[in-house]
Amino acid sequence: MRPLRRIGTAVLLCLPAVASGQGFDTTEDILWPDQGRYSGYPAEPDPRRVQFSVSGGIYHDDNIFRLSDSVAVPAGFSKSDTVYRLGVGFRADLPVSQQRFLFDAKVDNFTFDRNSELDHLAYRAGAAWRWQVTRQFTGDIGYARRRFLSDLGEIQAPLKDLITEDRLYASAGFAFTPRWRVRGAADWFKWDHSEPTRNVLDLRVSSTTVGLDYVTPANNSIGGQFKYSHGDYSNRQVFAAGTVANSYDEYETSAVLHWVLTGKTVLNARLGYTKREHDEVPARDFDGGTGRLSLDWAAGGKTLINVSAWREIRSVEEAGTLEQAAASYILSTGASIGPAWAPTVKLVFQLKAVHEKREYQGDPDPAFVVLGLPHREDTFNGVRLSAGYTPRRNLQFSLSAERGDRSSTTVGRDYEYNRVSGNARFQF
C-alpha cells in the first residue's frame, strides 16, 4: 500500500488551496526542510510520539466578503477586515507491533476586528488505524470531523454559515504476487450547514473504489480503477419552476500511474471517464473525460517544483469552496504551479499560482436545460507568496502575501482581493 499512500499525499499537496481565496493559511502550509522533502536536507528523526502545539495568526484582507465593485457593502459591515486566530493542537503516532494508530485534533478561535458577527470556533479531529496483517496485506480505517466557516467568496454576503464535515473511510490492499496488487476502498462523507437558508447544500456521499496495479521492483506502479459514488442531498432545491431533488449516481473508470521518471522527477496521474446521472432532470447529466496530472521535480537539493493540471466534476460540497449556487455539480478545469526553495535548513520560500475555470453545468433550472441558455462560468486566478523561518525545530514562523481575482458570466459574481498574513506555531 505504500505507493498508494504516496499517490494520495501528492494529490493532496497539489490541490488548489489558493483557488477559493478564502481559506486561512497556517504554518502547516509550508514545506519545511526538516520534513525530508528536499534531497539536500534529510528528514530529522523525531522520537516524540505525542505532540502538542499552540499557534496563532493575523490576517488582513481588503475584500473579506469577496464583493464585486458593482455591489455596495451591506450597511453596518466593513469591506476590509483583520482576523485574529488562536489555536491549540494535538497529534500522536503510536506504533504497536506492525500496527500504527494516528490521532490528530486542532481547535482554532477566529475573531474578526470589524465584522464581529463572523466570529467563530473551528475545529478538526480524527483517528486512524493503519493495519498490517502481513507485508502483502495492509490497509487503514479511520474517521475525521471538521467544522469551519463556509467560503465567503461564494456567499458574497455577511452570513455566518458553519459547515460540519464528517468522513468515515476504510481501505485494503493485497499483493497476491510480487508484481501485482489488488486494492479496494470505501468512503462516506456528510456535510451539514448551520445556516438554514443554505441547507439545500446538505449532502451525503458514499463511494466504493476497486483497483488493480502492476508494481515494479522500483515501487513504480501502473493500474486501473473503478469508482462508484452515490450522492444524496437532504433537501430539495427550490427554484422558479418548482422543486427538484439533486441526488445522483456517478461512475468513474480511470487509469492510474505513479512513476519515478528520474531520481528527481515523479509523475502521478489519473486519467479516465466519468458519468454522472441524476434522479431528476436528466438533461443535466454529465459524461466525459476527467483526470489529474501532477509532476514533482526536485530541481536541486534545495528546490522543489510541483506542476499540476486537472479536469474534474465535483459536487458543490466537494469543490473546496462550497458554492452558493443552484448547480448540483461543477466542471473544474485548471492548472497550478508551486515552486519552493529552501536556501538553509531554517529558511524556505514558496510560491503557489492557480488558474481555474468552473462551469456550473448541474443547474436544473429550465432556462438552462430546456431553453439552452448559457450556464454560469467563473474564471479564477490566484497567487500566494510565502516565507517560513524555523529558528528551532519546535518553533515556526511564516509570512504570506496573496492576490486573487475572479471573472464571471453572472453579474455581481466577479471580485478582486489582496491579503497579507503572519503565523506562528510552537510544538512541545
Image (tube, rainbow, N blue to C red):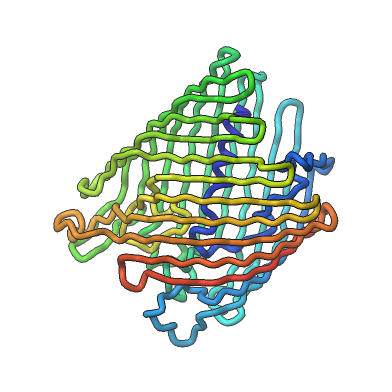
In the rendered view, would you say 398 is above or below 167?
below
Q: Position of residue 70 (x, y in %)?
A: 37, 80
Q: Which residue is at the far front?
A: 300
In the rendered view, would you say 77 is above or below 183?
below
Query: Along the horizontal axis of the image, is 79 left or right of 358?
Result: right
Q: Quadrant of the N terminus?
A: top right
Q: Nearer the viewer, residue 139 or 312?
A: 312
In this view of the protein, can residue 54 be seen by the observer?
no
Tell me the quarter of the picture where residue 285 sits.
Answer: top left
User: Residue at the location (39% across, 51% down)?
Assistant: 332
User: Residue at the location (51% across, 45% down)?
Assistant: 308
Q: Nearer the viewer, residue 206 or 65?
A: 65
Q: Position of residue 420 (x, y in %)?
A: 62, 70
Tell me the quarter of the picture where residue 17 sits.
Answer: bottom right
User: Residue at the location (19% across, 54% down)?
Assistant: 369
Q: Position of residue 216 (x, y in %)?
A: 59, 19
Query: Along the horizontal axis of the image, is 13 left or right of 276?
Result: right
In the rendered view, would you say 267 is above or below 219?
below
Tell me the quarter of the picture where residue 274 sits.
Answer: top left
In this view of the protein, can residue 370 be seen by the observer?
yes
Q: Which residue is at the far top?
A: 177
Q: Quadrant of the C terminus?
A: bottom right
Q: Nearer the viewer, residue 232 or 262?
A: 262
Q: Position of residue 14 (x, y in %)?
A: 55, 47
